[in-house]
Image (cartoon, rainbow, N blue to C red):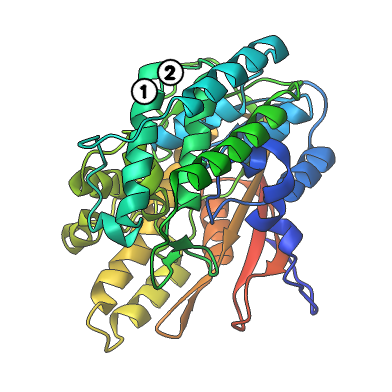
Amino acid sequence: MQVELSNNVERRNDYTFKYNEHFGRHGWLRLTPAYSVKLVREIILKDCKKGDLILDPFSGTATTGLVASEMGFSSRLFEINPFLIWLGNVKCQNFSANELEKLQAKFDQCLEDVAMSDNNWVPRIYNIERWWHSYTLFILASIRKNLVETFGEPNGNNYPNLVWVAFSRLIIETSSATFNHISMSFKESTTQYGLEQIKSLFSVIFSYIITSSKAQLLGNSQVILNNSRDFQFASDLLFDEVITSPPYPNRISYIRELRPYMYWIKFLKNGSDAGQLDWESIGGTWGTATSNLKKWKPTNNNLPERLYAVCEKIKGSEDKNSEVMSSYVHKYFDDIYSHLRNISRLLKPKAKLNYIVGNSSFYGYFVDTEKILSESMRELGYKKIVIETIRRRNTKKGLYEFNVKAVWN
């Protein structure tokens, strides 16, 4: 195993989600753990040749697939979250300029016709008025009712999905959510917006989405429902390149970040559904996902010794949650090991892999994700394993982001 380290590793914001905000479709919705458009482009330019088929088994917001399509490559992306599947497929779709103009006109009329009315449907988000001022919530519910009457609920790959992407952006922009840190948090208070303010904001958001939808994608990318542990993938396709960024073992829950969108767009109905979805995801920690860890048993017995050692240190900490956190770390790498074992049957000989990962710290003990991942790859028969240090993640000493590269034998 080769390790490439730099003594002067920079933070490199151009290798984070912040870089994506000003790049058309990549900036439609913010998901904090998303990785950089620039990083994916650099990997494709370096590794891929014309005609290569790219796989991302942890699609997220479909950054890999969208970049691949922009550059003329075809890709398949796997995702377990139904909202992210929907969003990713909308982002990777080509649209007709003529049909977009018709949609714009229909949207403008719909927005003009919005009428304030009582007893409209609102999502069953716990403590919802922590998210939105009651009057703002009243307006959003009225707008949503009019959207449903005009466009129907989100469905398939039709053009009105762009309206619902814009509405998703609207509900987060008018909420008390803030993204000043790596994860989402809340402002001290909610803001009361008026109807005309919200309509104006909605119009600006939709205009941005329409404009960025006009650019034609050169390749073809599709997001498919799949569990990245075992890959129930009914296809004869084999892949030349894997470019992905799995969730990091740091307890940042995707489902927590996505709840407002998923409730409003009706991909979630209640908290128990959210907890179950997070439990099925690698690295999930929301709701019942945490309580389930208390009875979880490993499925792989040959994980790297480095993992067992750090899990014992975490477990021996005096914190009341230390045993659960030890199980969390153990389960994360147990799942990743299953993933690496099963993904190999989807790869062509000499296929290249790029896994963008970050290390973590629990109670002062470092979890060396990049080393545990590379040692798991070696155990499973992957070759030419290299760890490249990409960037320093924050001001805390010792937290970095890496690209773990390998070749299938």
Q: Helix, strand or loop at disc 1?
A: helix
Name the residue located 72 percent from the left edge and 71 percent from the top edge: 11
- Dot 2 alpha-carbon crowd within 10 angstroms: few under 14, some 14 to 19, many 20 or more: some
Quadrant, the N terminus: bottom right
- Dot 1 alpha-carbon crowd within 10 angstroms: few under 14, some 14 to 19, many 20 or more: few
Q: Considering depth in this image, is 173 or 261 the residue closer to the camera?
A: 173
Q: Considering depth in this image, is 103 or 296 the residue closer to the camera?
A: 103
Q: Position of residue 147 (x, y in %)?
A: 41, 25
Q: Position of residue 322 (x, y in %)?
A: 28, 78
Query: Contact, CB < 8 Å: mark 2 with mark 1?
Result: yes
Pointer 1 residue: 148
Q: Mark 2 belongs to which amino acid? A: Phe
Q: Position of residue 373 (x, y in %)?
A: 54, 58
User: Residue 340: in sight, yes or no?
Assistant: no
Q: Mark 1 belongs to which amino acid? A: Val
Disc 2 to disc 1, C-alpha distance: 5 Å
Quadrant, the C terminus: top right
Pointer 2 residue: 151
Above or below — where is 131 with respect to 91? below
